[in-house]
Amino acid sequence: MLPPLPQDIHTFMGWSWPQIEPYYAELAARPLTAEDVAAWLADWSGLDERVYEMYQRLYVATTINTVNEDAQRRYARYLDEIYPAAEAARQTLKEKLLASGLEPAGFEIPLRNMRAEAALFRAANLPLLAEDLKLINAHEARIGAQTVMWAGEEKTIPQITPLYQDRDRAKREQAWRLAHERQLADRAALNELWQKFLRLRLQIAANADQPDYRAYKWRQLLRFDYTPEDCEQFHAAIEQAVAPAVERLFARRRQQLGVEALRPWDLGDGWYQRPINPLAHAPLRPFSQAAELQRTTAAIFHRVDPQLGHYFDTMQSESLLDLDNRKNKAPGGYCTHFDYSRRPFILMNAVGLHDDVQTLLHEGGHAFHAFEASALPYIHQTQYGMEIAEVASMAMELLAAPYLAKDQGGFYSATDAARARREHLEGMLCFWPFMACVDAFQHWVYTHPNDALDPALCDAQWAMLWQRFLRGVDWGGLDTEMATGWQRKIHIFQVPFYYVEYGLAQLGATQVWANALQDQAGAVTHYRRALALGGTRPLPELYAAAGAKFAFDADTLRSAVSLIEETLESLEQQVISHQ
């Protein structure tokens, strides 16, 4: 008889695989019948929750400080000693449950997923998957170490991005060129890392008897509700319904700026390419310290919904937020979930811009998803696809938008709140073509892997796609900077094919927003209802629960684009009337 597992996760964090393994072995040996399947699943869930949380906490430690050698060693030891063994043990349990023929209530989708995972599993891939995680760690360290000197001070790349929104065009250009020069200095190292990633992934697909890595990833991501062909339809719909609207926005901005052509430093720099707003007197500076960002965002969440505000209060009181930017902190932002503790954790790199507000609202949506789904009894039911996870985050940005003004508990004057909403909506509009470029690039990479092993051909493909989806900007004399844009997209290196979810979810979130314009409280109720379902229903049903349609077509996109353009016009008139 095994002793009970530790109730304190920090005690469990010190366990080695020889201590953990007997608990998986006992589950594998225990008889499984209809009468005891619920208890068996609960015990499996409790064990997996602890092992997953061990991984997440070790990973978080490496991102909080990328040069913490002890954190790196502990994380590497987990990947070498626990990760592959635990995956093999889980595979045994999946096969046991599937062989039993039992179908517990509420377990239809997890069983579907397990069948796919069991069919894809190969023991030979376990060390390769661990190696992929190590390469991701190396990539984060490489990007996190990129700094430049500005005004006599060392700055990370994120720390100089506020300058991309400066009204002084010469300063924007100087900052943009400085950052890209530093990023290009890592071009050869990133090319070498890319080839390692790609060769490793090709071997993983071959080991799993898949025709290519795209087919492997489709199964691994459990994409049952859409196909690669649906993604290609989505790309074409974006080219047809969204790209012209972005061209119109770019043309209007060029005229307002009074320039002959928009240049790259006339655009924001991030996961979209939003043009500089010439009506703005200065970039929005909603806060100076991360504590202020945290405090004011909490007030906004309480206005959206008291329970959501309570969730965020819990994160504050339990130190589950790491918001400020600093050297040797991993780039970007994320929300992860500590499964056993049933708590989310948010990391980001705030530097005082409105984009930081949007990031925290976005990651807050992910956190609320974790809180809402945590009531489900088994960990297998809380594992949902990114297609619905990103609805949670993107819809939250839109649901919170009415409360950005100070008189609503937010950051801004009424005029600046209108400006902030305009920037957000412009970013949404511009994101779809950028997303299509990133996703189409990955479809090309993994269906043309021999070509993609040549970084020069990757550059050429990226440039072609960029010109297809993002027209209206003059990149003259900057061919190298444009063609190497794929190197600056973290997702391409670290999470292949994890990007179309953003585009699909943004379309779903826009529909949630459209509902909120008619009934804000009702839209929030449907939103929370969908989140509480976790991963227990197919994607179309999850979207329907949120009040949206899971769609790839041009007509649905046109409706979303029309709403965005109409709202942008209304908000611009508000800004002009107050100047």
Image (tube, rainbow, N blue to C red):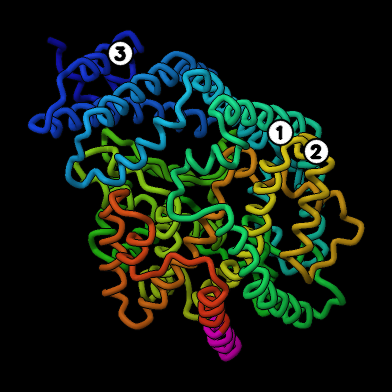
Q: Which quarter of the figure is the N terminus placed in?
A: top left
Q: Mark 3 = which residue?
A: 21
**Mark nearer the N terminus (2 vs 1):** 1
Tell me which amino acid carries mark 3.
Glu
* Relative image position of residue 552 (x, y in whole percent): 53, 66
Provide the residue span drawn in magenta: 566-579
Q: Which residue lies furthest to the right in this view?
A: 477
Pick whichever, 296 or 366, lies toward us. 366
Q: How crowded is mark 1: few (under 14 residues within 10 Å), some or many (20 or more)?
A: many
Q: In which quarter of the image is residue 148?
A: top right
Tell me which amino acid carries mark 2.
Pro
Q: Which quarter of the figure is the C terminus placed in?
A: bottom right
Q: How crowded is mark 2: few (under 14 residues within 10 Å), some or many (20 or more)?
A: some
Q: CA gap, disc 2 to disc 1?
A: 8 Å
**Mark nearer the N terminus (1 vs 3):** 3
Q: Mark 1 = which residue?
A: 194
Disc 3 is placed on an element classified as helix
Assign the magenta stretch its main secondary structure: helix
Disc 1 is placed on an element classified as helix
Tell me which amino acid carries mark 1.
Trp
**Mark nearer the N terminus (2 vs 3):** 3
